[in-house]
Amino acid sequence: MSSAGYDRAWAAWIGDRLERRGVPVVQRRWDPPPEMPLEEALRDLARPPGRVLLLLSDSFFQWGPRSHEEWNRVLRSEVAPRPDWFATVCVTTSALPHAASAVGVADLTDAGAREAERRLLDRLGLPTDPLPEQASASAGPRFPDDPPAVWGGVPRRNTRFTGRVEPLMALYDMLRATGNRHGRVVLHGMAGIGKTQLAAEYAHRFGSAYDVVWWVQADRRAAFRQELADLAPELGLPTGAEYGERLRAVRDALRGGEPHARWLLVLDGADEPEQIQDLVPSGPGHVLITSRNPEWTEHGCAALEVPPYTIQESVALVGLRAPRLTKDDAARLAEALDGLPLLLDQAAGWLSEAAMPVDEYIRLLDEGAGQDVVRVSADFPLAFRTAWSILLNRLRETAPEAVELLHLCCFFAPGAVPVRLLRAAPPEVLPEGLARLMGEPVRWGDAIRRLRQYSVIRVESGAAEGETSVHLHRMVHQIIRKDIPERERWALAEGAARALVAADPGDPSDPRHWPAYAALTTHLEWAEVLDSTDPRVHQLVLNCLRYMYLSGEYGSGIRFAEAAMGSWESALGAADPRTWALRHHYANLLRALGDYRNSERVERATADFLAAERGELDLDHLRAAGGLAADLRGLGRYQEAAELSASILERDRRVLGPEDPRTLNAENNLAVSLRLLGRYGDALALDERCLESRRAVLSPDAPAALYSEINLAMDLRLLGRYREAEHALRETVDHHLRVLGGNAPQTLRGRYHLALCQYAIKGAPAVLADLDRIRRDALRTLGEYTPLTLLISTGTASVRREAGDPREALELHEQVVAGYRSMLGDEHPYTIGTRGNLGLMRWTAGDRDRGAEDIKRACVRMARAVGEDHPWAIGWALNTALVRPADRRLPGRTNSDRADAVLGPGHPLAVACRAVLTAGPAEDTPPPRFWPFEPLVT
């Protein structure tokens, strides 16, 4: 028998009626994976011996979800032709798929138990004679369409109840697992998570399995006693009017199972077990408790924590409450509200009548305007903020130190906060009560217990062994933080900031510390670190910015650095060394996103000021000058950059010596400048020395040493030494993967250059899939229009031109050109080169005239931008000769001579230039092998 989980009451009753007649039944829950075809799922049911009985219902058809059209097809193709395999019964009053009429469905609804049993037996071809007396004597499951004999206090059914299949089924199983023994289950979780709604849905959905369903409010002992005593007359118990007598009679009746053994008692809001646990009845029935307090487990209860909605459940609820929203809108709202049903219902209720876009609504929530933008449904009678205000007032009265600990949690980010981080807050800066709590483990443990008791926090085990965290929901975090008195805020923020300082590993350049920095950066804003006057907190800020730069968190880093600039320049002054250090990190982040004009503005102002104030040998000035040289490289001013880089290297050697890490940085940067000038051999000589020194001075695993490994291999590739370069890049990519991981910007760069080496050796078809994969990783990690992503997209587009779909290749070329034009302008060598690549694409795709014109224009403009002797200009002269055969001889001879002189006669570009001179007529030659432009990291 196959049934949906929600139809278990029907499945239990049908199974009992069949087994009493000697028909063995195996129950199978209908929950095939959504990706499994229905045909396959039904055939899987029919594999064991015996017939298959399908219990058709709304839940059965909707699982997956599946459409009626899909079911119509499968009922006709799989069920109708096999009556010896499949039989069907209907346990819903809703309309079935049309094809159900072809499979002979027996309708068990709207009939009494006897008639429903007759229809079932008739559908299965079994005798319908009454059972012998001994077979029918014992009590079995109740007929699901029969209402309980006693029903009271249960909230009306929520017509928008959504999802919760797994918790409902888990609850059903936990209560049924007790058999005839007394079963107690507590549904626990934070306010607004949906405990009461889940209990109410259980009572409505499975209430027919009980003779008695009684719901009482259990938040106060007196009310609980009164409402439980009110059950006495409903059970027909002979008692007087005094409710104490009625209460004793009810407890005795439930314990003895007389007059009804199948009873369900729901205790809603029982947050204080010690207040009422002595009154909770025992006996053969079931007790279902809703509570914020998981400590009911100490009183003989099994526990089921109610989780937030899944994203699918959240989207479904929002769709019911606010049909005007798209699924994408609903998903963003669900993510913003972390799956809290009460809050989702309130937010969707407001949005259903407001014209406000969801993104604007989420912004309001983040700014703390949540109470003004909710609409409370009658299905959820207590507004979210109101519910939490009541709870917090109670905590202030009974556990004030726990509230102070909660206030400290609100100066870390919402979600999970490691306990070690909270305990690291120095007591001397905290409010008195909290400081006392920090120094006394017993008081600390009691405060945590009280917060858990009311499900204000969750205590979680972290990924690290022995790591424990407290979890505070983001909306609860917002409500509590907003109400913290102003007089406490400075002390709490300073305590949180100092705790973050204590957790700072101190070296953001070491990739082993990046997970720690990733965790720390989430808390910076909440701890208000930019308002701190503590130099140790300032160093934490600088370390985190350095981490964001190295790990590729450029956008977040820029936003944080801009906020810090405004705060520090006002508080510390423009001349403070910490302000200059901050400006340097800010410029690095701007440069990483390709905003070279603004990064130049920042670094030039810094370098000029420091040179005037401290002289040109000042180390802070040299650092700023190094950043300025990088900006000049980014802007395409390569000769200026090389001259400045050489000057910085000479001064660093003079001040620091040749082996200082900062000197080695200057040496590396000069090599970058030379490479951009096309002086690949000179760059190789510097990179070889720099790599050797960095490995010795730092370590082979230092990111700077790894960076030099890529640079040296790139020099080899640009010199045409592809096999050597491929070997070196294979080694360094493996090294990067071990140390930095697959998506660090440096690793992406190494993977890209390895793919280009393999392209030169094996051809485009062999590497297209790898380049597409690297580009996807860059897009996901860095975004579409960062310098590194555009660089990778340029190479990918060129390979697609040769081996991919022409339409996709053309579109990617156009995206790259648009990106470089926006970032760098029309006259930059990268824009010129990639527009030329677009011409190569057009020419290859058949648009010969327009393509040739684009290629010729790139040739002229590249020579003007970088000089005729630059390899980029030589490459475009070659491409021009390839598409204009009539003009190739004379300019081709000059270009070939240049290539021999600049790169050497054995270089692949020089060889290609000579080949043009000896090529026959155009109609006799194979398609040209172009030399596409390749931008370099600046």
Image (cartoon, grey):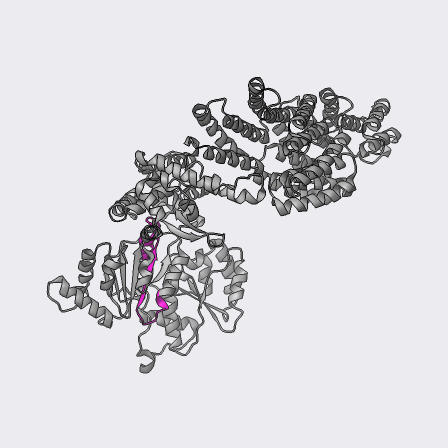
Q: Position of residue 927 (x, y in %)?
A: 80, 35
Q: Is residue 203 or residue 255 the one in the foreground?
A: 255
Residue lying at the far top of the rendered structure: 612
**What residue is drawn where x is 30% and y is 61%?**
288
- Residue 644: image quadrant is top right
Q: Is residue 191 magenta?
A: yes
**What residue is drawn where x is 49% and y is 52%?**
463
Is 570 on the left-hand or right-hand side of 135? right
Magenta residues? Answer: 175-200
Position of the N terminus, as image quadrant, is: bottom left
Position of the C terminus, as image quadrant, is: top right
Is 676 on the left-hand or right-hand side of 499? right
Question: From the viewer's perspective, is residue 35 above or below residue 531?
Answer: below
Q: Position of residue 111 (x, y in %)?
A: 32, 66
- Residue 359: image quadrant is top left
Q: Is residue 481 magenta?
A: no
Q: Position of residue 603 (x, y in %)?
A: 57, 23
Q: Is residue 82 or residue 888 the one in the foreground?
A: 888
User: Can you see residue 316?
Assistant: no
Q: Is residue 179 or residue 211 the one in the foreground?
A: 179
User: Can you see residue 919?
Assistant: yes
Q: Is residue 114 or residue 510 the one in the foreground?
A: 510
The number of numbered discs placed on residues in the rendered structure image is 0
Question: From the viewer's perspective, is residue 172 above or below residue 931?
Answer: below
Question: From the viewer's perspective, is residue 262 above or below residue 70?
Answer: below
